[in-house]
Amino acid sequence: MTHHPAIIGYYTTRFGELWDKSLFQLVREAVDGVMASCRTETESMDAIFFSNMMGGILENNLHAGAKLAEVLGVNLPIFRTEAACASGGMAVHLATQYVTARPGTTVLVVGAEKMTDYAPEETASALMSAASGEEQSAGLTFPGLYAMLANVYLETYGYARDCLAPVPHKNHFHGSLNEQAHFRKQISIREILASPPVASPLTLLDCSPISDGASAIIVSSNKSFIKKSAHAISILATEVATDTISLKGRGRLDELAATRIASEKAFGASGIKPRDINVAELHDCFSIAELLAMEDIGFWKKGTAGQRAKELSTMLGSGGTLTVNTSGGLKAAGHPVGATGIKQIGELFLQLTGQAGKRQVKKAAYGLAHNVGGSGGTAVVTILGQR
Amino acid sequence: MLSPVKLWRRQKEIRSILGKKGKVVTATTVFVPTPEFKKYAPYTVVLVDFGHGIKAFGQLADTHDDCRTGTRVVAVLRKTKEVMQEDVIAYGIKFRIIP
């Protein structure tokens, strides 16, 4: 018997440059898809959580709850979450609190982003609204901020930039197995290192892309509904931590403290240990981010990720005990900001219920999702498992 | 459009940092900028520590060479970004390497 809320369905659109679809057409596809997978309908939901970052800036489209009510033809309570790139994880967190506070309820969580209607530099500029004013005024970009973190890491622990390349190499291999991924092409370490610089030491292939896409899950605390569903996985913990929006306010730049704090709380709340996790979806917006996450979550000791990443032990088929970013991560699956955190949790749902097809990790019992907003100002860590 | 009021409010902070000497904490050279910085790319942005808990971000003036941790710099006044023709000129902090 479970006392935990459960995820009972998942659907994601393809991620990529989806020029024939608008933001709300993507949302519609994701919602219809997840409802069909659970043989239910939107009218049976008790509430909707909608995750989207940039509709307000790029499309002059706020009050998204009412827009969504119109699109879906419902009068349900709809809550929008915005925590930059952690908007999706935040939506799942709040949905979990909602169904826990109201036992017997079932909610839809949908996240979407439309990013390719605009020139890349306009989208980059809109993304920078998630950084401090001073960072914006200095001409920094998100690749720039993570490049600064990368330089601190490389200098502190004595690595060269080639220690970053195994991350996109591995994640593109996983993406090649995911039909919904933005990029399905494998890339070699040499290609990554030789790609054009974006913000030193990061090159183009260290960076996640600008993508369109929408993902949806259904979260429930309704015991009979969970029992009746074909697949269910419990949400054992979901924790949020925050930090200064600007890098300049942080005590240390060789870690994201928000990740460390949210992880400690999530492991504490679930009684699960890092070594129990078999599959993880980590926030690899830039290659350095996955290395920092491996350490800050506690999978690897601080300062060792630069060396350990080269062993590719977290790649499918390596025989390791933990496989990371089977979806392809943000790098290969794509990064439609509002959808990302929901796709991460959806991917774990597929893995833990044996529905991941060609990229299925054998005997996956526990999964962890790590979703970061900005340069580490917000982190959401979610642990799923059968219980 | 750049808000003149916002710029005016920031001036106090800019004034308090001008002429200060500090050390680079971390740096990056940006090759792919946002639209208002296109003209300057590639450029190097540094995070500078002045001690006593005071830090600031800014671009290196006059160079875009990679710059290592510990490099000593001084804060100088420069035009910091491209603005619309009728906007207030955006003056702010950049950093010069102390030879």
Image (cartoon, coloured by chain):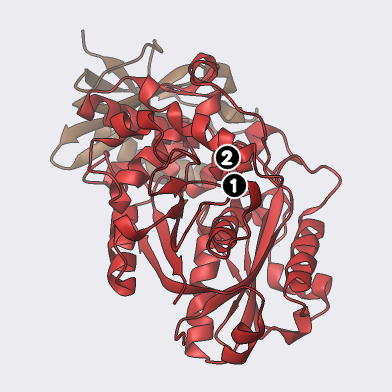
Chain colours: A red, B brown
Give the residue type at disc 1: Arg
Query: Height in image: A52 above or below B20?
Result: below
Q: Is residue A26 left or right of residue A254?
A: right
**Who is closer to the viewer here, A46 or A360?**
A360
Residue A302 location (% of width, % of height): 23, 41
Question: Which element type, helix, strand or loop, lies under badge 2?
Answer: helix
Cα distance between the residues tagged 2 and 1: 7 Å
Q: Position of residue A181 (x, y in %)?
A: 67, 43
**Sequence-wise first label, 2 or 1:** 2
Q: Residue at x 17, y 43 (%)?
A: B53
Crowd class of label 2 (few under 14; some 14 to 19; many from 20; radius 10 Å): many
The residue identified by callout 2 is A174
Tags 2 and 1 touching, CB below 8 Å: yes
Residue A56 left/right relative to A39: left
Residue in the image at 64% along x and 68% along y? A217
Q: Taking A302 as reference, is A277 above or below it?
A: below
Q: Residue furthest top?
A: B99
Secondary structure, mark 1, is helix
Question: Which chain does the residue under circle 2 lie in?
Answer: A
Estimate the x, y position of residue A119 in percent, counting from the top left: 71, 33
The residue singled out by tag 1 in the image is A359
Q: Chain of mark 1?
A: A
Depth check, front residue: B86 or A204: A204
Q: Name the residue located 51 percent from the left edge and 62 percent from the top edge.
A: A89
Q: Is residue A89 above or below residue A315?
A: below
Give the image quarter of residue A41. Answer: bottom right
Counting labels gives: 2
Residue type at tag 2: His
Residue drawn where x is 73% and y is 38% of the image? A118
Residue A65, placed above or below residue A2? above
